[in-house]
Amino acid sequence: MIRSLPQSKLYSRGFRLYILLYFVFLFAPLLVTCLLAFNDSQFPSLPWKGFTWEWFTGNRPDRIGIFNDQSNLDSIWVSAQTAFFVSILSLIVGTCAAFLFEQEHFRFKSLLYFLMLAPLVIPGVILGISILMFANSLGLYFETSFNLDVPLFRPGFWLVVLGQFSFICTFVSLVVSAKLKKFDRSLEEAALNLGANRFEVIWYITLKFLRPALIGSAAVAFLMSFENFNTTLFLIGSETTLPINLYLQLRDGSTPVINAISFLLIVGTSMLALVNLYFSSRQTES
């Protein structure tokens, strides 16, 4: 929309209608899911049969709430642990990569940048299969050549962490790199002239400037890891993450406890977004 040009009433109404329909399409499924988390029914769908808290707190054989459902609680804990380690690894390596790609004199910069972006264009299914085959090949090599059984090369928790880290790290690097492009290098030079060493400059000036990007990219990395399905499906071991566990429940038939889990995730994600917005606004004000 070009605001300087005259607009007809039909165009303005059509534009507002488009915005309204867009947000209805975007948020209506989430609102319905949240409402069904309190539906007094044995099925995770309409019609509405009354209000209940039992899908959160219930502890009956025919109606177990999320807070008493050990299988789902265990999968949430596994997903949280996975997301924590993935976000930490991605934040460290992604930030270092952003610093590296911002160097002016860096050989093969374009080629390595292209290789860094490659996991983003590869489908998650292909990425998961590739990592699984590579890990199995390495595990077989170590077993046949050195008679060593390396747990890392078997489907399990740490292979999931490495598999998700392989592409989530790229998102962190892109976010931090975009913020780093706006950094005034003269601040570093001034700090060095005043007697600060290189580590102090990075810690007290550069990283402080990057704090909103670091917090935001860490939050994005955590959420991407927590909800990842395609890549995780091929790397998971006996401990399933929440998306895999929900998929298995939906495949075999489930109760509205799935809606209760979705409600908690929506609330948690919204709170994380608000925290990120708060730190970003504080950085802007300062």
Image: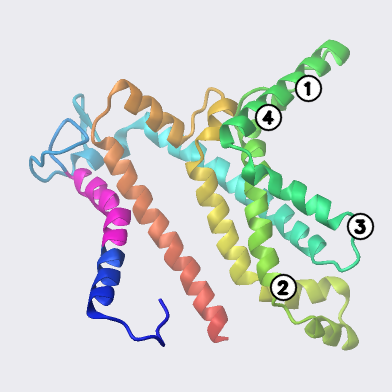
Q: Is residue 231 visible?
A: no
In the image, the segment drawn in magenta is: 21-38
What whole-number distance in Å separates the C-alpha atoms at marks 2 and 1? 39 Å
Q: Amino acid at mark 1?
A: Leu
**Residue 47 appearing in the image:** yes
Q: Is residue 124 left or right of residue 29?
A: right
Question: Which numbered tag is attached to residue 165?
Answer: none
Between marks 2 and 1 in the image, the one whose residue lies nearer the viewer: 2
Residue type at mark 2 is Lys
Residue beneath label 4, please? 131
- The image quadrant where one finds the N terminus is bottom left
Q: Residue at x 59, y 57 (%)?
A: 218
Which residue position holds label 2?
A: 181
Position above or below: 112 against 210 = above
The image shows residue 87 at horizontal and vertical percentages of 61, 51
Q: Nearer the viewer, mark 1 or mark 4?
A: 4
Q: CA gap, disc 3 to disc 2?
A: 19 Å
The span from disc 4 to disc 3 (Cα, nearest Å) is: 28 Å
Q: Secondary structure at mark 3?
A: loop
